[in-house]
Amino acid sequence: MALVAVTSMAIEPKPDPIFAAIEHRRATRPVFSETATDEVINRLTESDNEAVFRVLTTQPTTLLGVAAVLRYVCEPMYGEDFGESILEHSLGAPGDWGDVGRAFLPMIANVIARLSAG
């Protein structure tokens, strides 16, 4: 009888991508000043829109990620001075913003169902 050596290999789980999307948006969220030109405001807004879209379209891979993104999209979009949350803003917006906002909650429901099924 031959003996086979078995080595234990720890498999590290992949990090949930939603945390990177949230941190990216936090790091790049613009701070607007009264002295900013329209060009600067437009550039900052465009960059922020991309970061918000990333948050709203990235599928969490863990239940902790689901909880984190649900909390995050309910925070004020631009801090306490802008009381509307990312989710409120996107749900009421026309075009791509609205499409992404309306797709967000069904996506999260699908992620929860998938994670619950094991």
Image (spheres, rainbow, N blue to C red):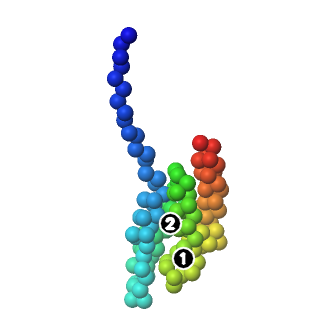
Residue kind at label 2, given as amino acid type = Val
Outermost residue on the bottom side: it is 34
Residue positioned 59% across, 47% down in the render = 115
Rendered-image quadrant of the N terminus: top left
Secondary structure at badge 1 equals: loop
Q: Is residue 66 above or below residue 94?
A: above
Q: Which residue is disc 1 drawn over?
A: 76
Calculate the distance from the C-alpha at mark 1 to the C-alpha at mark 2: 12 Å
On screen, residue 3 versus residue 101, left or right, reads left
Q: Which mark is residue 97?
A: none
Residue positioned 64% across, 68% down in the render = 91
Q: Is residue 1 above or below residue 17?
A: above
Q: Residues within 10 Å of mark 1 (few under 14, many from 20)?
A: some
Q: Is residue 69 visible?
A: yes
Q: Residue 28's x, y, as percent? A: 40, 70
> In the figure, residue 7 lies in which quadrant?
top left
Rendered-image quadrant of the C terminus: top right
Q: Residue 108's x, y, as percent? A: 61, 56
**Residue toward you, 50 or 42:** 50
Residue kind at label 1, given as amino acid type = Pro
**Residue toward you, 14 or 51:** 14
Q: Which residue is disc 2 drawn over?
A: 52
N-terminal label among 1 and 2? 2
Secondary structure at badge 2 equals: helix
Residue positioned 51% across, 82% down in the render = 80
Q: Is residue 3 above or below residue 42?
A: above
Viewer-nearest of discs 1 and 2: 1
Q: Residue 117's x, y, as percent? A: 63, 43
Outermost residue on the top side: it is 1
On screen, residue 18 versus residue 36, left or right, reads right
Q: Is residue 96 visible?
A: no
